[in-house]
Image (cartoon, rainbow, N blue to C red):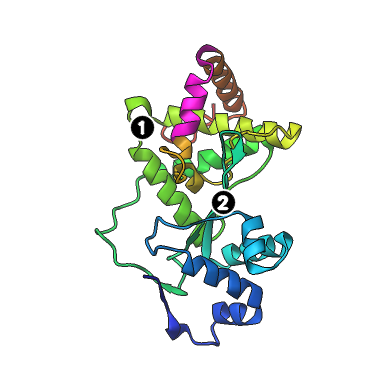
Amino acid sequence: MIKINNLLTVDHDLSKFLLGDPVSSTLLWYFLLDHPGGEDNGSAVSVKELADKLKFTPRVIQKRIDYLEDNGFILSFTPEFYGGQRLPSIYQINFESEFFIKPPKKSAPKEESPDVDLMIAKFTEINLAIHNEKYAPVTPQQRSKWVKGAEKILTLKPDGHNFSMQTYEEVVVFLAEQMKEHLVNKTAYMMQCRDLGNLVYTHPSQSDCKYINAYRKMTHGNTNTNKENINEQTNRYTEHGISTHDSLWEEV
């Protein structure tokens, strides 16, 4: 069950936004009614499907999705290619927004790992160095998503291996090179990831999250060639003046 914080009143900025934009309100109602209620659940639907169901153009729908995310109502997870087809995007209710009443926590919140800030910084710096696109959390809601993603990655064991910062960097470098191939050469079916939080999302049609899938594609797709390429890319990234294997950023 999703509860709306009606104590905000109609004079609150979030209320004014929804009351002043009926299309955004309609879209939010769709996500609310299509949402099971848990923090990790959401709507798997394409922009075209939303446009057909709500009787608006895809352009209008995409713009309102951006509005809802910018105002902190929802979180979106970018689509992935699977079996030659693009999977639909995932839209989740952002329970960090004061517009909603957060579901009760199952356990007490744990302290943030000291590696989290480093992982966020590395994700941003690696993408900037490789394809000159800066991906970083700007709002508190975005940072919350990135922190959750980083903390989840710390618990993952790709091929049975515990977390290592070096492996994390290699996966981020691999994804950044995939993104570069997509941006520069318009190559289809490249793995794309613009935010750290999206790395840990598991699509309903898949058994593993994007981080694990990227790791396996990086290490098993063409083992020797892939490993040599990733090492070369990571070394090239290091040559920009950033150490990729220390616990803190240090000048090389």
The quadrant of the rendering that contains the N terminus is bottom left
Q: Is residue 135 left or right of residue 113?
A: right
Residue 160 figure quarter: top left
Q: Secondary structure at mark 1?
A: loop
Residue under pointer 2: 89
Instruction: Decide which of tag 2 and tag 1 comes sooner along the chain.
Output: 2
At x 61% / y 23%, what residue is drawn?
A: 236
Report whether residue 85 is seen. yes
The quadrant of the rendering that contains the C terminus is top right
Whether 174 is drawn above or below 104: the answer is above
Report whether residue 169 is seen. no
The residues colored magenta run 212-224
Residue under pointer 1: 163
Q: Residue furthest top?
A: 224
Count residues near mark 1 (Cα–Cα under 10 Å), then give few for <14, some for 14-19, many for 20+.
some
Residue 71 figure quarter: bottom right
Q: Secondary structure at mark 2?
A: loop
